[in-house]
Image: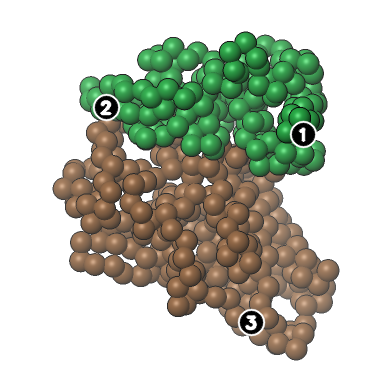
């Protein structure tokens, strides 16, 4: 108990090797989830590979398809970066609603995904924008759509020796609009009771494409399927009620300290409706 | 028990220490450097009593392992005053009576310094937002918000002189 062995490699390849060599090793990024968990779980022994010295993990850069955001980029940077604010505004918005100022100064966008909490705020916009996770491994790099990244609470497709390098987010289509709602018990320092991200593409006032991601209402963030029945529609009150109902049916919320199953179902409907009403406002 | 050498700057002074790898920054500041102004409240990053500036950004030092501070510049509550002269934010907290038991005060003051760096004349919403991560169980926050406004005026005045 209480033992920590600490490594802070400067190269991504060294991080991968260390993770493969050292039994039970894990990645330390911002530490806001891991260190808190370590303290709450009686200071279990840890072998840590700190990734903060690896330069390519903390870059934000424009790439051919859109934007690359390194896994080690902190939430405060995500919420303030001009490129993210102009192209992916709800990602900046979600990052600005994580924890507190102090948490956002430490917590990373990669850590938010790898921790794989169903309530992870930044995961919803990343998924709705169609982001891919770029994963470094001994065999080389691979990409996984973020929609296929999560397996269960705290579980992802990452294997031993994998390092999440960052996300590539494709540029959103023309005439698209994005909305985000974090419904929590209080505005700051709380996890989402229900989270919703919506991406809406319009063609001459009618819906051409709709994507909805729900957070904190299932074992993983939920990509709502079957929304094509709403394509070609006009966003009127009846449309909003029907799509909110459809989304609530796609979720499988549980009862916990943040809200009951019934409350969450009601709040999914309310939050989804809010996204579409914000558009028509 | 594993140890590691740590080189960092605390309140402007270079420090070379041998630290335990399982100690947090808050523990090293308090136990090894004797900087007892930094308080440990919840120990889980919720209450903000342990807030310090790390490379100019406010962080909860109970969630930072000491070894992560390698090469960093840390400012604690002890590093704000210049000799006997208090920092304008400290002065403002005294003037407003924004201190009751005092346990949250060092963290509140550090968060206020960070807030005013970003928003020199914050509105009420920005003050609430900037102090989200600092809990106070005595004051009801009103005096603290007043102190932030007083500090903002003091610092704006200071720049004109």
Q: Nearer the viewer, mark 3 or mark 1?
A: 1
- CA gap, disc 2 to disc 3? 53 Å
Of labels 2 and 3, the one closer to you: 2
Give above or below for A127 relative to B92. below
Labelled pair 3, 1 in contact (Cβ < 8 Å): no
Name the quarter where the N terminus of chain B is drawn.
top left
- Circle 3 residue: A174
Is residue B74 something that shows in the picture? yes
Q: Position of residue A73 (x, y in %)?
A: 46, 53
Relative to A129, residue A230 above or below = below
Q: Chain of mark 3?
A: A
**What chain is the brown one?**
A
Q: Could you tell me which chain the residue with mark 1 belongs to?
A: B
Residue B69 left/right relative to A117: left
Residue A3 in view in this figure:
no
Instruction: Work out whether residue A97 or residue A263 is closer to the camera in this orientation and state it.
Output: A97
Where in the figure is residue A67, as x and y percent of width and height?
A: 49, 69
The image shows a total of numbered marks equal to 3
Disc 1 versus disc 2: distance between alpha carbons? Answer: 44 Å
Residue B64: x and y, percent? 43, 32
Residue positioned 34% across, 47% down in the render: A53
Q: Residues within 10 Å of mark 1 (few under 14, many from 20)?
A: few
Q: State the mark number for residue B5.
A: 2
| Chain seen in green | B
Asked if the residue at tag 2 contacts the one at tag 1, i.e. Cβ–Cβ closer than 8 Å, the answer is no
Q: Identify the element where label 1 is drawn.
A: helix
Please name whichever residue, B72 or A225, is drawn nearer the observer in this view of the structure: B72
Mark found first going from the N terminus, 1 or 2: 2
The residue located at (28%, 49%) in the rendering is A10
Mark 1 lies on residue: B160
């Amino acid at each position: 108990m209480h033992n920590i062995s600490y490594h802070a490699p400067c190269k991504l390849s060294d991080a991968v090797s260390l993770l493969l060599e050292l039994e039970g090793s894990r990645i330390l990024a911002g530490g806001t989830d891991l260190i808190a968990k370590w303290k709450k779980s009686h200071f279990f022994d840890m072998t840590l590979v700190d990734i903060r010295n690896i330069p390519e993990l903390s870059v934000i850069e424009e790439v051919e398809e859109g934007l690359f955001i390194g896994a080690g980029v902190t939430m405060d940077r995500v919420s303030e970066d001009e490129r993210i604010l102009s192209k992916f505004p709800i990602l900046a918005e979600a990052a600005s609603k994580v924890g507190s100022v102090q948490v956002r100064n430490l917590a990373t966008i990669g850590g938010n995904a790898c921790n794989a909490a169903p309530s992870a705020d930044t995961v919803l916009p990343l998924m709705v924008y169609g982001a891919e996770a770029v994963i470094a491994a001994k065999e080389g790099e691979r990409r996984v759509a973020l929609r296929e990244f999560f397996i269960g609470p705290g579980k992802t497709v990452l294997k031993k020796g994998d390092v999440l390098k960052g996300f590539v987010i494709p540029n959103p289509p023309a005439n698209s609009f994005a909305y985000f709602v974090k419904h929590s018990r209080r505005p700051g320092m709380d996890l989402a009771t229900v989270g919703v991200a919506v991406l809406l593409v319009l063609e001459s006032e009618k819906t051409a494409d709709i994507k909805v991601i729900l957070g904190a209402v299932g074992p993983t963030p939920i990509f709502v399927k079957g929304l094509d029945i709403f394509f070609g529609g006009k966003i009127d009150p009846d449309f909003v009620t029907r799509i909110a109902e459809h989304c609530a049916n796609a979720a499988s919320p549980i009862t916990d300290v943040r809200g009951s199953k019934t409350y969450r179902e009601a709040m999914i409907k309310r939050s989804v409706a809010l996204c579409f009403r914000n558009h028509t406002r | 028990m594993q140890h590691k050498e740590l080189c960092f700057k605390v309140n402007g002074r270079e420090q070379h220490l041998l630290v335990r790898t399982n100690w947090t920054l808050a523990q090293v500041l308090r136990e090894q450097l004797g900087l007892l102004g930094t308080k440990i409240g919840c120990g889980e990053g919720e209450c903000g009593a342990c807030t310090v500036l790390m490379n100019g950004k406010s962080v909860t030092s109970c969630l930072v392992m000491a070894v992560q501070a390698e090469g960093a510049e840390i400012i604690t509550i002890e590093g704000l005053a210049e000799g006997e002269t208090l920092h304008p934010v400290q002065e403002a907290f005294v003037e407003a009576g924004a201190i009751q038991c005092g346990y949250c005060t060092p963290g509140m003051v550090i968060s206020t310094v960070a807030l005013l760096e970003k928003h020199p004349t914050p509105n009420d919403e920005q003050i609430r937002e900037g102090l989200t991560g600092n809990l106070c169980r005595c004051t009801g926050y009103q005096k603290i918000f007043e102190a932030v406004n007083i500090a903002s005026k003091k610092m704006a005045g200071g720049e004109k002189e």
